[in-house]
Image (spheres, coloured by chain):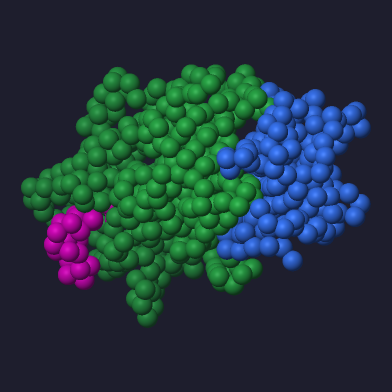
Chain colours: A blue, B green
Amino acid sequence: MGEPRQTTTLSQELADFLQSGISISIATRDGSLTPNGTRAWAVTADDDRTHITAFLYANTAEPILRDLHAHPEVALGFDRPSDSRACQVKGSYVASHRCRAVDRKVIDRQVAGFFADLGTIGIPAALFRGWKTWPAVAIRIRVTDVFHQTPGPGAGERMR
Amino acid sequence: MTMALETLASCFQGIFPATLYTCSADGIPNVSTLSHVDYVDAKHVALSFQFFNKSRRNISENPKALVRLYDPDTSQAYLFRLRFVRSETAGPTFESMRLRIEAIASHSGLKGIFKLIAADIYEVESVEPAEDEAGAPEAVAAAQNIAPHVPAVPFTMKALGELSERIQRAPTLECLLESILETLESLFGFGHSMILLTNERPDRLVTLASRGYENRGVGSEVGFGEGIIGMVAEARKPIRISGMIRQMLYANAVAVRAQEQGVRSEDRCIPLPGLLSPESQLGIPLLVRDELFGVLCIESEKAYRFHEQDKTYLEVLGGYLAIAIQNALLRERSEESEEPDAGPRPSPTTPPAPGTGRPRIEVAFYKIDECILVDGEYLVRSLPAKILWKILLESGQSGKREFTNRQLRLDKSLALPEFKDNLESRLILLRRRLEERCPAIRIASSGRGRFHLELACEVALVEKP
């Protein structure tokens, strides 16, 4: 898998975008290169913006953590449905913990933001009554790369 | 748990964004949003390949993929474990995807940039519901104001029989078009619809009848390949699009990126006739033995309003409607030719004497582009404009108010083709444009192949170069 990748610092504008309440997906893989993935409900960025923490529903986090303990490579896709602005953060797994009450406030706030954004394109929040966000697990990730992912020419290019 | 793909048809409508997870050969995972996943058969799905991105590179190195898809009827997410099989650049799956994508691209002014490179075919190894994104069908039903799992089945034999009867009763082409749209609403629940027919200008369609819109839009034109209606005409195949707002947003994001990268200069989007923000659109070509007569388009502000079944039924119905339109055209022409050209008949309404205080309007004919403006406002152009100009001139010179289609056909100045002159549809268009824009001038039918001119105003004719 080569040399460990260098740590990257997110711009403040990008860190704000990631934490603004949008669609987040997390991707891992197992030893046979089979991809795994699920939804992350929120992220927070450290003050120095070199690490982010993703919050996942606990049950669906289990296979993700199983992958990460053996293969720390991880990708997080961010997408704002109302304008398709999207990017992808690649990183390396650092640690995880069971979420506490303080984390729940972050999750609830970002989930509400995500549902509100869907509402602007005619998808009402009532449709997601069955979706589960709690109990949750927090996964801390060191950021190594960021890529443009808004659809169209230039998607996939590294952000500078 | 593995589920049968046939039971998940709703997932393939593209209403909620899907997510694709892949992994490179050197073990780096990747995640991206997908514009559409198509059902191919009981064991395969197709993903659209539009840009050479990281996901596509990963698949070429490692065929394993995971897709998360949503059922818009229940909001349940499903995880599809996939294995890449092949890329297709032709065939029914590719064509169906291409038409839908190019229709959206054309509608967004992105033709040539936002296009399908290939339909990537994947074998579905397993499908299971996502635990964290469980469905809430009652909430969905309440939000959409529909009963869950009760698909509407409007195409009963009784309804089809009634449609057929109404079509056969329609005495003229104009009545037929009205009857078709009225029936689509009253029997099948399609409240917003329009019929566009081919005309004397090659590769263009003109709207002759519409229903459910504030502005009827009669006379508005669409070029072949322009927007969803134009794509239906160009491909001569039906196109059904659900969740248009999301797909337009996706296309718009591509447009913004293309402009930023200098790939596309800013240009005007083609305005779609009909609803301002349609969520669902279904376009059906009206074909008789591969000859295109026009396009029937129905729309809705509801996402996923039209199902695959609607497309199939309306495609069959489209053939029937096209034959009915063709028959109406042929019948009107043959009956008019059987009727002797008996010269002027008395007008059913006595024209008021000139100069008796009626309003005065200026009708200007621009020779250069064969276009008529009434009091400076555009009315009509091409053949309908030439017909109106001719009958107004004759009326002004001799007081003549009765005209026959036959006379028009024989008039060399109109230069109607001997075969398929579209005269009836041109007269319908002219009549409706006058109703909308200049009701003081009226063309009313006075029998088969005959019409009379009614003037509730003084007309000043001005010919411009």
Q: Residue at x 23, y 37 (%)?
A: B320
Q: Residue furthest bottom?
A: B465
In the image, B43 versus B345, the foreground residue is B43
The segment highlighted magenta reads B402-427
> Residue B87, percent across and down?
40, 50
Residue A18, above or below B189: below
- Is residue B271 found left or right of B297 in the rendered image? right
Q: Residue at x 26, y 23 (%)?
A: B161
Residue B145, above or below B67: above
> Residue A74, percent across and down?
70, 46
In the image, B215 versus A83, the foreground residue is A83
> Residue A58, percent across and down?
76, 27
Residue B135, above or below B326: above
> Residue B54, percent across and down?
58, 55
- Asked if the magenta segment contains residue B447, the reply would be no
Q: Residue at x 49, y 63 (%)?
A: B113
Q: Residue at x 92, y 32 (%)?
A: A102
In the image, A51 versus B261, the foreground residue is A51
Q: Quadrant of the C terminus of chain B?
A: bottom left
- Is residue B130 found left or right of B345 in the rendered image? right
Q: How many marks?
A: 0
- Asked if the magenta segment contains residue B425, the reply would be yes
Question: Is residue A36 something one can see in this rendering?
Answer: yes
- Is residue B447 found left or right of A95 in the rendered image? left
Residue B259, above or below A5: below
Question: Is residue B221 something one can see in this rendering?
Answer: no
- Is residue B227 found left or right of A9 in the rendered image? left
Q: Quadrant of residue B70?
A: top right
Q: Quadrant of residue B373?
A: bottom left
Q: Residue furthest front?
A: A2
In the image, B66 versus B442, the foreground residue is B66
